[in-house]
Each structure stands twice: as structure tokens, then as C-alpha cells.
Amino acid sequence: WAIGVISYMLLSASKPFYHKRRRRMIDLIMRADYNFDAPVWKGITQDGKDFVSSLLVINPKQRLTATTALEHPWIVERERLSHEIPSQEVLEAVGETLLAYKETSQLKKLALNVIAHRSTSDEIMHLRQAFEAFDADKAGTISYDEFKKALETSNYSEEDLQEIFESIDINKNGRIMYTEFLAATMEAHGHIEERRIAEAFDRMDSDDSGFISKQNLKEILGKDFTKEAFDDIMASADTDGDGKISYPEFLAHSDD
């Protein structure tokens, strides 16, 4: 109901229910008594009007749910605005970065996920556009079939595509989450500034010891990772063998 009211207001710059007398206005709301008579509605498609009408329904059982609203033709078939479509350059850079990400160490992937999670909308605008291009069904995640379809012109083998997909799917749920995609494509923007790497280190060093320990990694990765996996991550960056990762070690590893 609320989305219906908001949609009506955004499309027409007016309220669906209004009267100078409060009691009369409440009566209009209770009866869902509104119309599309204003001149502005002549420029709104029938699908747009139907979307609003399907939400401004008194009986909740007859009203669109959040899920069915997202499946409405006005939403699904909406033409994307030019600023929402990623350029060919961005898509090509993303494709190349995804292939390189397959060879990235587990520790660097963790760092990139932390950086992605803390990035602002302005910083990742083009990557968000790329994600939406991959996410064909607009589910908010990318399936393997969507991933394969998006990269069909890249001439990657089926084996490469599967390996790239699995390397991005950090939590191993069979779908690429938004933050996972950002992490995998972050370097499409170019070299990551050291301050962002330092922020990731501080975030992973949750006990402020000045080092990243195995315990820190366990807190980030959870119980699903094996002892061998933790040991491999530590061994890849702990060059002096003291059982913990210092910032210089972390920085050197992130620049690989």
C-alpha cells in the first residue's frame, strides 16, 4: 500500500488521496478512492497505472506482494536509462579482472571483500551497473547460468568459467552475492589506493593487536573453513614465519 502511494506521488507529483477536510480525506483512503484524471497521467503508460492500481487495494490478500510487485511488467520491462547501462569498456575491464581474480590468493580476496563492503555508492557506481547487467533476473544475486551468459562473448572455456565463478563465490552458496562481485571486479577501476588496503587491514585486525592472527581469520571466515585452509592463508602471507600477518606483509601480499 505504501509503495503504491509513493509510486503515485512520484509519477504525478500529487497525492492519491487529498481533501481539505481531514474526515473526508480519511474516508477517501478507507475506500481507496483515487483517480488518474490529472493531465500528467496522460503521459504515463497503462502498465504504470496498473502497477499503482494493483498496490492501492484495500484487501491485503488481493494486493500485490513485494515479490509479485517486482515481477510486474512495469518493473520487469522498464527500459533502462542510459546512465544505468555499463559502457563496453567497463564490461571488458570487468571480464579481464574476473579472470585475474581466479588466481588471486584467499587473503587478498578477503581484503577486497572488506574494501568492497566499505565502498561508497559513488566509488563503485560503474561496478554496480556491471552487476545489474550480469543479474538478468534482478534477484540481487548472480547464478552460474547468468554469469555464463554475461561472459559468452569472452571466449572463456566452460572449465575457466566454472573456476572463475567458484573463485568469486566466497561463501560457497552457489550464487555470487553483490559484495562478492564488487570484490572480484574492484581492480577494474585500477590500482587500489594504500589507504583502502590499510582500512581493510584494520578491519581484519579486529582485536587491534597490530597483526592479523588465525583467530582474526576465523572470525571473518567462520566455521566452514578447515584448519588447512586457515594454515594456507597464513602461510601465503606470513613471510617471517611468526604465526601472524603484519601490515607490511599484508601490503606486499595485496600488491601481488
Image (tube, grey):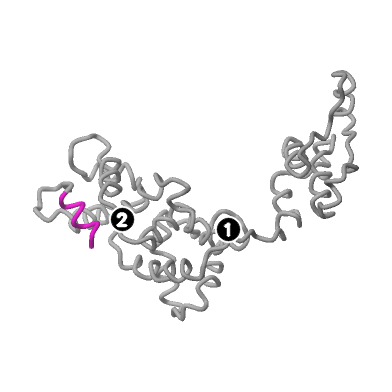
**Residue 129 locus on image (x, y percent):** 53, 58
Crowding at label 1, few (<14), some or many (≥20) Cα neighbours within 10 Å?
Answer: few
Q: Quadrant of the N terminus?
A: top right
Give the mark count: 2
Q: Nearer the viewer, residue 122 or 175?
A: 122
**Residue 117 locus on image (x, y percent):** 41, 46
Distance Cα–Cα, label 1 vs label 2: 24 Å
Amino acid carrying label 2: it is Ile
Q: Residue at x 47, y 56 (%)?
A: 173
Q: Does 2 sit left or right of 109 as displayed?
A: right
Give residue 212's quadrant in the image.
top left
Q: Does 117 sit left or right of 201 as displayed?
A: right
100 drawn magenta: no
Q: Residue at x 31, y 51 (%)?
A: 111
**Magenta stretch, main secondary structure class:** helix
The residue furthest front is 39
Q: Which residues are magenta?
A: 248-256
Q: Which residue is mark 2?
A: 192
Amino acid carrying label 1: it is His
SS at mark 1 in the image? helix
